Image (tube, coloured by chain):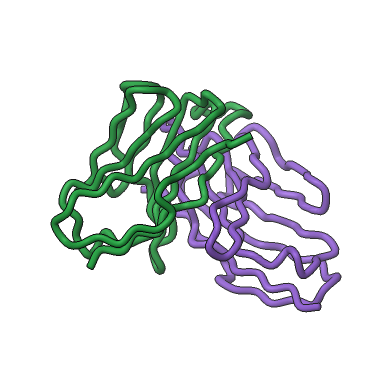
Amino acid sequence: DAGITQSPRYKITETGRQVTLMCHQTWSHSYMFWYRQDLGHGLRLIYYSAAADITDKGEVPDGYVVSRSKTENFPLTLESATRSQTSVYFCASSESGRGASTDTQYFGPGTRLTVL
Amino acid sequence: KQEVTQIPAALSVPEGENLVLNCSFTDSAIYNLQWFRQDPGKGLTSLLLIQSSQREQTSGRLNASLDKSSGRSTLYIAASQPGDSATYLCAVTQGGSEKLVFGKGTKLTVNP
């Protein structure tokens, strides 16, 4: 019963490097989401996906790229990391996303990213 | 733009007390409202989901209510325990969207 996992759990990188954060879920949920959590801002949506090969921007998409070739995976790439992208990143998934009782989002444990 | 506010930002109570956490949102056109719990250094755990057509949901010692027209929700915790200490977040799914908009949370401390 793995649920939703994220890797790595901790990452330190340098400004300008490309970084990919991985997210994997075992429930075959249609929807997957990427959030960042920062003090003073709370949780903010970066990108989300309603199904394989369907992605859409959230509130703070600049500097990030996502893909979803398989239902169970939703990687997030920082193309050229900046210090402002230092944050805790959470991946989440849900069975549905438009008002059903199955909209409940299940969160991964998070990835703490530091950009030096 | 939907804004979700949680007041107070922090709350400290003695063990055994019944308590209420508040959440307000500016746009009543929502699909649902969810309450989450976050322990330090951990991810979020879903507690309750209230659909827009519902007034309340209950799970154990937790009861969440929703008044969509006034843009308010409350999370009632009965007989609080030290293990309830965590940050509680509410979030709404905006109508016409799959996106969750989060409040900044209420940090609850229950003292033994």
> In which quadrant of the rendered view does residue A75 lie?
top left
Tell me residue B63's x, y (percent). Answer: 76, 50
Q: In this view, does B19 lie above or below B34?
A: below
| Residue at (37, 46) in percent of width and height | A45
**In the depicted view, which residue is nearer to us: A72 or A53?**
A72
Output the letter for the chain in green.
Answer: A
**In the depicted view, which residue is nearer to us: B79 or B38?**
B38
Tell me residue A43's x, y (percent). Answer: 43, 55
Residue B19 shown left or right of residue A66 in the figure: right
**In the depicted view, which residue is nearer to us: A59 or A71?**
A71
| Residue at (43, 60) in percent of width and height | A42
**In the depicted view, which residue is nearer to us: A7 or A68?**
A7
Give the number of callouts: 0
Chain B: colour as depicted: purple
Q: In which quarter of the image is the C terminus of chain B?
A: bottom right
Tell me residue A82's x, y (percent). Answer: 19, 60
> In which quadrant of the rendered view does residue A86 lie?
bottom left
